[in-house]
Amino acid sequence: MKRAKKKKVARRRAKPAKAKRVKKKVSARTPRAKNRQAAQRRRGLMFVLSSPSGAGKTTLTRMLLEDERKNVELSISVTTREKRASEIEGRHYYFIDRKKFDDMVKSGELLEWAEVHGNGYGTPKKPVEQFLRAGKDVIFDIDWQGTLQLYNAARRDVVSVFVLPPSSQELRVRLARRAEDNQEVIDRRLRNAIEELEHWREYDYILVNDDLDRAYRALKSILAAERQRRASRGAKSGTEIEAAEKMRRDAQPRLADLVKKLQSEL
Ligand code: ADP
Ligand code: 5GP
């Protein structure tokens, strides 16, 4: 018993020496060491996009990934839903069966998970942690239930954006034009949109996806503002930050009316 106690003390004393050695190595002035230091200083942020199905979050996500290949990574979810014709395993989703999904939930492999439109969806934890540690921003295309779980896990690392369609008619048109789901699935998604819309106030930013290029520019400036905020440790000023704040304030009264209208028409 006594010996075990002694060992514990010895281990505790040994720690500072190890920490000192690591510090010395990182402070080397080679370009590689400097890059490593920069990555260690900046932990990536979790950039969440949610919307009623068909509003355009996948399109916006893909545009951002194209543009920011070096700095942004996509979190690829697992799902039990059927693969669409255009989808690629491991690029859009990992398509798994219900048993595997339940096992992943049980073993804690998912950072968050939810039942959406009758299927299981979830975010594998490991890749997200690796990207964030390497200083990359991670983009998530998840629903409101998943967003709330990320808030609970790491609110300060999360920036959330809710994408709205400009009208219910346009939402119907987009779902039909995507032409990847049958009518029954489309109808179910439209019904679920009413519930998804209930949660818009829980998001940091709201983006109306009318003109795609305009919406994309707004999305980019939100990301730039949040990066600037983090780089300057919570600063409330800065060109990008001020532009994003204005976008948030100006939008509020108009948005509540738009959401009400969408819900009544769906
Ligand atoms: P979500 O991921 O939210 O379900 P998608 O990104 O798949 O939605 O978009 C649904 C459909 O709407 C796609 O066919 C897409 O090309 C189209 N779309 C997206 N944004 C716009 C926009 N601003 N204007 C017109 N069509 C759009
Ligand atoms: P879809 O079947 O159209 O690809 O996605 C349906 C819904 O599931 C969308 O709202 C999408 O954001 C959400 N979703 C996709 N992956 C995840 C995930 O890993 N977790 C959660 N909570 N929702 C997800």
Image (tube, rainbow, N blue to C red):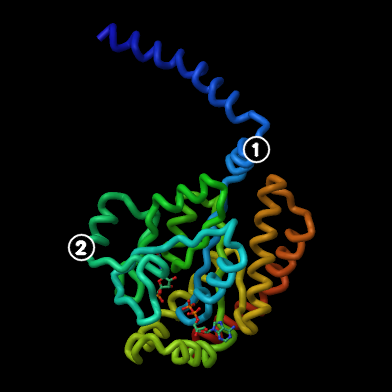
Q: Which residue is mark 1?
A: 34
Provide the secondary structure element on which disc 1 rests: helix
Q: Which residue sits furthest left?
A: 99
Residue 144 x/y as whole percent: 45, 67
Tell me the distance, in whole angstroms, between the alpha carbons under discs 2 and 1.
45 Å
Tell me if residue 114 can be seen. Answer: no
Image quadrant for the N terminus?
Answer: top left
Residue 2 horizontal side relative to residue 91, left or right: left
Residue 6 x/y as whole percent: 34, 8
Q: Residue at x 73, y 59 (%)?
A: 241
**The one of 244 and 95 positioned closer to us in this rendering:** 95
Image-quadrant location for residue 137: bottom right
Residue 8 x/y as whole percent: 36, 14
Provide the secondary structure element on which disc 2 rests: helix
**The one of 26 and 9 positioned closer to us in this rendering:** 26
Choose mark 2 or mark 1, whichever is in front.
1
- Amino acid at dot 2: Lys
Tell me if residue 230 can be seen. Answer: yes
Task: Sort mark 2 into few (<14), some (14-19) or many (20+) by Cα contacts within 10 Å.
Answer: few
Q: Residue at x 66, y 79 (%)?
A: 213
| 11 up-or-down from 39: above or below | above
Task: Sort mark 1 into few (<14), some (14-19) or many (20+) by Cα contacts within 10 Å.
Answer: some
Residue 23 x/y as whole percent: 58, 26
Image-quadrant location for residue 221: bottom right
Q: Residue at x 46, y 48 (%)?
A: 130
- Amino acid at dot 1: Lys
| 108 up-or-down from 116: above or below | above
The disc, 2 or 1, on the residue closer to the chain's N-terminal end is 1
Residue 229 horizontal side relative to residue 193, left or right: right
Q: Which residue is mark 2?
A: 99
Q: How many marks?
A: 2
